[in-house]
């Protein structure tokens, strides 16, 4: 019978977890714990020990590295870390590989602003290949800041084997996955809805995309009077900040449980 002669060396550095006096140094203690995890390769070792267990996969919506992490990312990341730790502690193998979203519109917006690109004609002059390369360069702009924040949270994530949604092999793996295709056949439906639209990019926008260029502006306020059909001398007065919708208005809605005031005067 073969014997395993491999020996594991114990790090000689002694980490101090003590609390000085009666004051709890939460920040210092957390830093010491994180340093200890790195010293013993806790995450990597846990994956090696669990490699023969049933696999548990958390489909994590990946962040985008063209912006810095904020409170919402920290909160959601903490919850996700709790789920994967629970899965590991209940007898599963959890790899926890980080992915990166590569939003097209925010990246293009940044490049367009930097190089004063106003439309497709400017992109054609620059060259599509050059334009795409400029976009790829900034996709991972804040990757290091993301790694620093995730590490400080104490969340165990594999940054070395990450994936990016802009990779063709990733897109192909999603498009050609039989389970995903079957799921989409069941769940996908079609409807007509109002979408934010970018005239510069010539594409509909998600709520996130639309918020990238959010600005406070002075919009017109229009007061409109609508005569009653049974008594044209009485008019309902309504206020709107979206006057471009008025041509499509066919009627005014009233609430039978609300109180309306009838005013005598020539206001409109």
Image: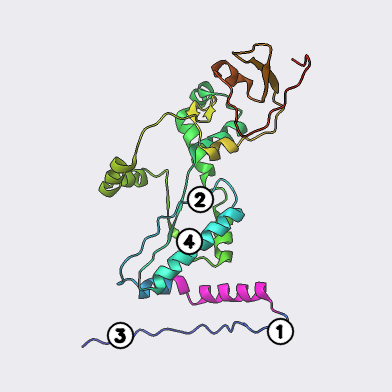
Q: Check disc 4 and report the residue beneath it.
A: 80
Decide whether the magenta segment is chiefly helix, strand or loop: helix
Residue depicted at x 65% and y 11%:
232
> How is this picture coloured?
rainbow
Residue bearing the label numbered 1: 20
The residue positioned farthest toward the front in the image shown: 230
Which residue does the numbered mark 2 point to in the structure image?
63
- Residue 96, located in which quarter of the rendered image? bottom left
Q: Is residue 154 shown above or below 19?
A: above
Residue 4 disc label:
3
Q: CA distance from mark 4 to mark 2?
A: 13 Å
Q: Nearer the viewer, residue 96 or 167?
A: 96
Q: Are marks 1 and 2 in contact (CB under 8 Å)?
A: no
Q: Is residue 219 above or below residue 92?
A: above
Q: Nearer the viewer, mark 4 or mark 2?
A: 4
- Cα distance between the residues tagged 1 and 4: 33 Å
Is residue 169 rendered to the left or right of residue 71? left
Mark 1 in CB contact with mark 4 (< 8 angstroms): no
Of circles 4 and 3, which is in front? 4
Q: Residue 193 location in percent, x, y?
A: 46, 30
Query: What stretch of residues is rendered in magenta?
Result: 24-43
Q: Is residue 56 left or right of residue 80?
A: left
- Is 244 situated above or below 178? above
Q: How far, Cα to Cα, is label 3 from label 2?
A: 42 Å
Instruction: Check the picture and name the quadrant holding the C terminus.
Output: top right
Classify mark 2: helix, strand or loop.
loop
Residue furthest to the top:
232
Please provide percent x and percent y for residue 263.
Answer: 76, 21
């Amino acid at each position: 019978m073969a014997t395993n002669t491999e020996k594991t060396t114990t790090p000689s550095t002694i980490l101090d977890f003590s609390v000085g006096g009666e004051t709890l140094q939460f920040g210092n203690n957390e830093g010491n714990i994180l340093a200890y995890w790195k010293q013993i390769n806790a995450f990597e070792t846990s994956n090696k020990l669990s490699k023969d267990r049933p696999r548990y996969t958390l489909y994590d919506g990946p962040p985008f590295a063209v912006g810095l992490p904020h409170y919402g990312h920290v909160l959601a990341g903490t919850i996700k870390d709790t789920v994967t730790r629970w899965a590991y502690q209940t007898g599963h193998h959890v790899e926890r590989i980080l992915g990166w979203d590569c939003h097209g519109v925010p990246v293009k917006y940044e490049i367009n602003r930097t190089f004063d690109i106003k439309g497709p004609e400017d992109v054609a002059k620059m060259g599509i290949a050059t334009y795409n390369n400029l976009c790829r360069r900034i996709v991972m702009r804040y990757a290091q800041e993301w790694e620093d924040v995730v590490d400080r949270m104490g969340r165990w994530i594999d940054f070395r084997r990450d994936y990016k949604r802009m990779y063709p092999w990733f897109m192909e793996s999603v498009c050609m996955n039989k389970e995903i295709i079957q799921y989409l056949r069941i769940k996908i439906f079609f409807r007509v809805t109002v979408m934010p639209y970018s005239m510069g990019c010539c594409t509909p926008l998600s709520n996130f995309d639309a918020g990238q260029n959010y600005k406070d502006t002075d919009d017109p306020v229009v007061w409109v009077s609508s005569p009653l059909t049974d008594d044209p001398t009485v008019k309902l007065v309504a206020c709107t900040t979206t006057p471009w919708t008025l041509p499509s208005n066919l009627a005014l809605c009233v609430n039978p449980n609300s109180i309306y005031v009838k005013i005598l005067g020539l206001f409109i």
